[in-house]
């Protein structure tokens, strides 16, 4: 067979996937430099798949996946240098600059530097913020000056809810406790900053999906992403399927956003999309809203 035809036939499924795939916003991508690459993740995922080899390979594979799956915007969080690297390589302007923080003074940041980074558009989303891993909650006093700045500049906040990796407490995050990941622990923030744009990450995890829904009922400005729950293991998929069924029945599906949270496993982007698309109780419109429309509304993207 002619070589060109062979190449065309090889590319055809990818092309058709991209064509048929609705536009996607990924609200939950992690970036790394080699200094912190793989420092928090196990060597393989639950199914034994190794992650990317290093930070550069991971970035290139993820940017390629953005193209392949029609991901037009992605909130990328990591250390500031890694986010800079991603933004530099991102010729399609997909990257929305986030920052990963476990404590308010990570990377030597204080409120003065933080405000400057926001003014310089180095931080466009304050997230992933994961107080759980450092033994704090977003309602604690140490986080308040940062939240005030976010409210002042209308910068959206993404906060980790639900537990983390089960081995984490014995290794890289000794202060993490499941009780600190209860979505109710952000309630004071919702009360204090009613104008703050804020989304839960992981929808309360396996731990408190009902608390996530109840909080969304009380606070109509509150959104959530789905994140790692979509792919990481059968148990999280079981919980997120129930969450989606319940949040749809409750009537708050219009505040649920896709996020892959693939960490160092770019293949998990495809896995997450396929899992979401396989849920028969969601209509085509529901899926389009979760994959794009809800996040476009939350981020106030210009059409
Ligand atoms: Zn995450």
Image (cartoon, rainbow, N blue to C red):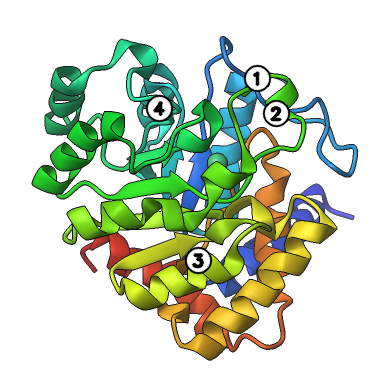
- Mark 3 is surrounded, within 10 Å at the Cα level, by few (under 14), some (14 to 19) or many (20 or more) other residues, namely many
> Which callout, 1 or 4, points at the residue further toward the start of the chain?
4
The vertical placement of 9 against 248, above or below, is above
The vertical placement of 56 against 217, above or below, is above
* Disc sitting over residue 172 in the figure: 1
> Which callout, 2 or 3, points at the residue further toward the start of the chain?
2
Q: Is any atom of residue 237 visible in this view?
A: yes
Taking the image as shown, residue 120 lies to the left or right of residue 288, namely left
Location of the C terminus (image quadrant):
bottom left
Picture mark count: 4
Location of residue 276 (image quadrant): bottom right
Q: Which residue is mark 4?
A: 83
User: Residue sitting at 72 percent across and 86 percent down?
Assistant: 280
Q: Are marks 4 and 2 in contact (CB under 8 Å)?
A: no
Taking the image as shown, residue 246 lies to the left or right of residue 298, namely right
Helix, strand or loop status at disc 3: helix
Q: How far apart are labels 1 and 4 at the CA level? A: 22 Å
Q: Are marks 2 and 3 in contact (CB under 8 Å)?
A: no
Q: Are marks 1 and 2 in contact (CB under 8 Å)?
A: yes
Q: Which residue is mark 2?
A: 168
Q: Are marks 1 and 4 in contact (CB under 8 Å)?
A: no
Residue 101 picture location, percent across and down: 42, 28
User: Residue sitting at 29 percent across and 69 percent down?
Assistant: 297
């Amino acid at each position: 067979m002619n070589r060109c035809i062979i190449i065309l036939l090889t590319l055809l499924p990818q092309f058709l996937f991209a064509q048929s795939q609705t536009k996607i916003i990924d609200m939950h991508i992690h970036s790394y430099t080699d200094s912190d690459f793989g420092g928090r993740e196990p060597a393989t995922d639950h199914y034994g798949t190794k992650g990317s080899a290093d930070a550069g390979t991971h970035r290139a594979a993820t940017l390629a996946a953005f193209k392949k799956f029609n991901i037009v915007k992605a909130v990328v969080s990591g250390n500031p240098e890694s986010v800079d690297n991603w933004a530099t390589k991102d010729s399609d302007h997909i990257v929305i600059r986030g920052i990963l923080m476990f404590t308010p003074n990570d990377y030597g940041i204080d409120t003065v530097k933080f405000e400057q980074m926001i003014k310089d558009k180095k931080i466009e989303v304050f997230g992933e913020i994961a107080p759980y891993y450092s033994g704090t909650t977003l309602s604690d006093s140490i986080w308040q000056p940062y939240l005030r700045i976010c409210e002042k500049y209308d910068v959206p906040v993404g906060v980790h809810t639900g537990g983390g990796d089960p081995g984490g407490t014995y290794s890289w995050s000794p202060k993490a406790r499941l009780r600190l990941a209860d979505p109710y622990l952000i309630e004071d923030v919702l009360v204090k900053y009613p104008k703050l744009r804020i989304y839960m990450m992981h929808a309360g995890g396996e731990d408190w999906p009902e608390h996530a829904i109840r909080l969304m009922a009380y606070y109509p400005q509150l959104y959530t992403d789905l994140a790692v729950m979509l792919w990481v293991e059968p148990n999280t998929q079981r919980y997120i399927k129930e969450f989606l069924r319940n949040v749809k029945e409750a009537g708050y599906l219009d505040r649920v956003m896709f996020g892959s949270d693939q960490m160092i496993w770019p293949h998990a982007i495809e896995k997450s999309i396929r899992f979401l698309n396989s849920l028969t109780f969601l209509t085509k419109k529901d899926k389009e809203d979760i994959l794009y429309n809800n996040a476009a509304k939350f981020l106030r993207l210009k059409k």
